Amino acid sequence: MSHAFEGPRYLVSFGPKRVPHCFTDVLILGGGLAGLRAALAVDPRLSLTVVTKDDLQGSSSQWAQGGIAGVVDPEDRFDNHVADTLTAGCELCHGEVVDSVVREAPGRIAELIAWGTRFDERDGALELGREGGHSHHRIVHALGDATGREVMRAVIEQMKKLDNLSVWPETFTIDLITHEGVCRGALVWNPRHGKTLVWARRTILATGGAGQIYRESTNPPGSSGDGMALAWRAGAELRDMEFMQFHPTVLYIAGGSRSLITEAVRGAGAWLVDRDGKRFMPDFDPRAELAPRDVVSRAITVVMHRTHHANVYLDLSHLDPATVRGRFPGMAAICGTFGLDLARDRIPVRPGAHYMIGGVSVDAVGRTSVPGLLAAGEVTSSGLHGANRLASNSLLEGLVYGARAGEAASADVLAEASPDADTFHVPAIAQPRAIDNRTAGEAAALDLADIRNSLRALMWRHVGVERTGDSLAEAHATVEGWCRYVLPQQFADPQGWQLQNMLEVARLMIRGAIDRVETRGVHFRADHPATSAAWRAHIAWRRGETAPRLEPLP
């Protein structure tokens, strides 16, 4: 099966002589934790620009509930955290990456504390939580169940001290600009200035994940895979796109937003029960509710099918009510808006798309396969997560790789130019795309919301927790059909560009899921339920190649 239709290299036409130009040493695309940590690592002698399509409060990092995993308890060991991560990753993690990130974790957590992050404490020491897949209590958390909000508050305050920083909020990145295979910056758009060419000596991609490609998702609206699509069109290698992690417990109430219920709720002793009140996780795994997320999500799906019920339930009624409400105030408040008492009522939950494990291939410091382009955080495939991310390793990865990417970008720029250099070599870029009056005229006739909703529903039905070859083939044919008439269009605003990115990323995910004829981690093929040693490999792909490549792990 070939990648039948290849969309345009650039989504829109732009004349370099007809749009404004901006120049910066380091350009960071994305305002979540990975992007902001990269900004804080950029050498202060260099100019720095952060572009984010929302504002600095709109990233997935803000939504993170559980916490940050790290060995800070004297009873814990680095080897324990490494072993837990490798076990969760189902033999697809890179051991040296896991080891280096785990060993860096305590220092990154201490750094956040020094910047003013107020993690929860008990008796003067950090209060450590435990989540699925962890053998020890090692999760630092804040405000009970709002760690991301507190961490981002402290990091944003630290950012305000930077004299070399310019932030462009509510600015959409349309495409990365490349010349002779090297990334030179990006074409961006906002309502005030329209298109702008931002030239950069180094560009760091930190745009987050792709959870909004699914109908049921814990992600904010901006998590639509834009960075992966940008990198793909620019020629970067993407890998393991079939691995989308589904969080087992998403609040499922008609009319309500799909709010994540943190894994820490199960870590505190909550049970999963079916419609009849029967606890079922001990039947699936000896770790019960503390099994890794892929195991719990799959078990919930089985129980939903078996009971012909749209969800299962979290039950905390056997725990101390005051402790529950004190530890999870945010979740208690959300449940309360629907007349539910988190401490006493059964809370309806089901899995939802949560974290994109696959993405842009990066090395140990965040360099991609495209010179001049680095990446950090959820947009990447770093080798840390394997086929299933261990709980609370995501904010950790953003901190570690954000810092590394910022430092590497700075080192590259300083090696090429003096800190006070104010001249840029701007390549002579030809008109990237001829305007087609037919496609430009037809763009307005498409109901973009309908296509977007149809895509999200299709991905949930056919590329969700449980997959089969037949359902994936149907999804592939349908999405290819949409790509043929949507990707050639030239849209004038982010609604269209975002849909084009979602379609591009969706078909990469579907193709990866078709090619991986085994079950591993978050990728469950009901028609191939066994894990195969032959598939202990990455599936990697670049634009222009006729098919993905298999890259076996050593």
Image: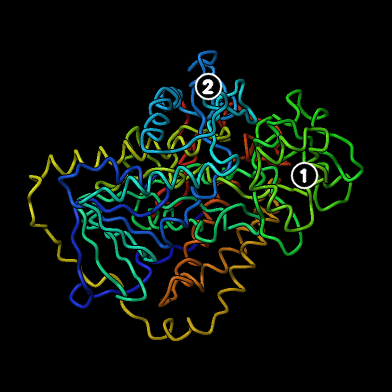
Q: Quick one: 79 or 465, which is closer to the camera?
A: 79
Disc 2 secondary structure class: helix
Decide if residue 467 is in sight here: no
Residue at the image position 54 percent from the left and 17 percent from the top: 80
Give the colouring mode of the picture: rainbow
Q: Which residue is mark 2?
A: 81
Q: Quadrant of residue 43?
A: top left
Identity, as a three-letter code, of the amino acid under mark 2: His
Residue plotted at (60% across, 29% down):
129
Q: Element type at marker 1?
A: helix
Quadrant where the image shows the C terminus: top left
Residue 499, image x and y in percent?
A: 51, 67
Residue sitting nearer the eye, 493 or 461: 493
Seen at 38% across and 26% down, the residue is 107
Mark 1 or 2: in front is 2
Residue sitting farthest toward the top? 75
Q: Position of residue 126 (x, y in %)?
A: 52, 26
* Residue 188 appears left or right of 145: left
In the rendered structure, the answer to whether residue 451 lies left or right of residue 439 reads: right
* Residue 342 sits above or below residue 390 on the image: below
Q: Position of residue 267 (x, y in %)?
A: 68, 31
Q: Where is residue 223 shown, x and y percent of the image?
A: 51, 56
Is 147 situated above or below 55?
above
Q: Badge 2, how many Cα within 10 Å: few under 14, some, many 20+?
A: many
x 32%, y 62%: residue: 168
Residue at numbered disc 1: 301
> Residue 453 versus residue 508: which sits nearer the camera?
453
